[in-house]
Image (cartoon, coloured by chain):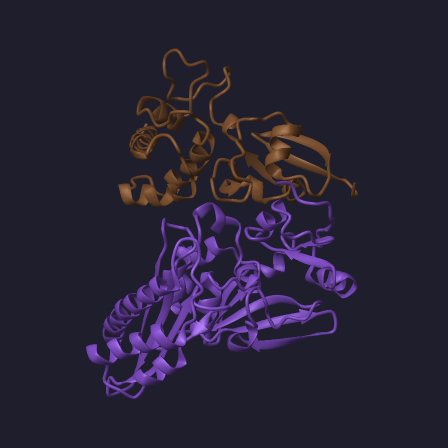
Amino acid sequence: MKPAPFEYHAPASLDQALDLMHEHGDEAKLLAGGQSLVPAMNFRVMQPGRLIDLNRIEELSFIREQGAALRIGAMARERHLEFDPSVAKRTPLLAEAVPFIAHPQIRNRGTIGGSIVNADPAAELPVLMLALDARLKARNASGERWIEAQDFFAGMFTTALALDEILVEIELPFMPPRTGWSFMEVAPRAGDYALMGVAVLIALDEQNKCEQAKLVYLNAGDGPVDAKESARLLEGEMLNDKLVESAAGLASEKEINPFGNVHTSPEFQRHLANVLTKNALKQAMKRAEENLQ
Amino acid sequence: MTQSFPVTITVNEKVYKCEVEPRLLLSDFLRHELGLTGTHVGCEHGVCGACTILFDGESTRSCLMFAVQADGHAITTVEGLAAPLSSPHLFTDEGTEGGLHPIQQAFWEAHGLQCGYCTPGILMTVIPFLKQNPNPGEDEIRGALSGNLCRCTGYQHIVDAVILAAEKMRDLESL
């Protein structure tokens, strides 16, 4: 239960980190909060030859509003998201979901960027990035590019980042008015990995019809699963119990692909997805109606 | 062996200057290098919470950090809670040398431990929790304790101890 030896760097600036990634990106791992990486290293499941520790880079730790978007530095801690007034006001879905991420001790260290790049299908933050239409800024020594969340997750623990790139910033558009949200998950114990979870957004148009819907699932496939067909079923309609029932059925039976694990069978995960979808849609609809002004 | 790094780490208000190999976990640094064995090591993968310490005042798993990362930071372990003989806490129980921290005292009085293995981690979780939530309900307490496993008590007496600890801390504040 001790990590294998590695070379260690603790750059004080992003430029230094980018230079190190330029030189060593093929063998280096970035150390953000370390709440997934260090356990894997303790088990020696991972034995990176080199760690580049981002914790000394203060310029990567911020949460601010800019225009109609929230901009969050990749090293912002989950605990900061949890208590940030801008997060609560501008992206209440994120504020609602963060307390579900592991335990307070983990959230004190864990970072938004680290969880996104880790791309664990059972994690909350990748799901939220898809639900909130995040844009993710990647940098390497020669430049930067923005990646849409829907293009970022490339499979289990895999992302669109190149070997020399660092995720530096997350941009979340403010949730529009007339929008309702809900995040729900079922875990054996508070803070454990959820057996199933869903993030839901419902935006209503001027006639109170569903203009846009989002249903994104965790632990439901090899990455965050965006149930687009089910969302399409709701869009353009006056929402009612029958539609909610249909969307939940379609998402849980056809769109997700849960694998099961030691705690649950895929059938039970589908059952949970069905129930959670119905409950979350109802809560989101209620909140959307409260948010009409 | 990889290159060692010089670090300056403040633990329980005492400054230590050491050389550490990067792979040395903070939990092992505290226990093996400094001899502060009050920080317990249970699972070493962030599940059990026994190794919880305060890192710059916030509860943190010391098994999920490297000692080299603590360079320039302040750590509090369970050894830092009870007052030294020279400066007893305001809230001193008769018969305890130097005085337990009120939260430790509450765990004693409410029988909030049996074997004691999980206790240091739980105390280091409860300290910042009660600072943020001076008057928590039972649900909040159970939520705060969700990251700490106890295999003896069934948690009920731990919850009782935290309720009592909150009372003691509030009494102390109002002095």
Point 39% across, 22% down: residue: B90
In the figure, B109 relative to A120: above or below? above
Q: Quadrant of the C terminus of chain A?
A: bottom left
> Could you say where residue A85 lies in the image, as x and y percent from the top left?
40, 60
Toward which corner of the image does residue A68 lie, by quadrant? bottom left
Point 31% across, 66% down: residue: A271
Horizontal side, residue A260 vs residue B76: left or right: left
Point 56% across, 29% down: residue: B12
Most foreground residue, A54 or A184: A184
Horizontal side, residue B22 vs residue B49: left or right: right
In the figure, A230 relative to A6: above or below? below
In the figure, A88 relative to A110: above or below? below
Horizontal side, residue A204 vs residue A131: left or right: left
- Rendered purple, the chain in question is A
Most foreground residue, B60 or B151: B151
Q: Quadrant of the N terminus of chain A?
A: top right
Most foreground residue, B122 or A292: B122
> Could you say where residue A116 lies in the image, as x and y percent from the top left?
54, 64
Residue A178 visible in the current orientation: no
> Could you say where residue B15 lies in the image, as x and y percent from the top left?
64, 30
Toward which corner of the image does residue B26 lie, by quadrant? top right
Residue A282 visible in the current orientation: yes
Give the number of marks. 0
Q: Colour of chain B?
A: brown
Farthest left residue in view: A241
> Could you say where residue A46 lies in the image, as x and y percent from the top left?
65, 53
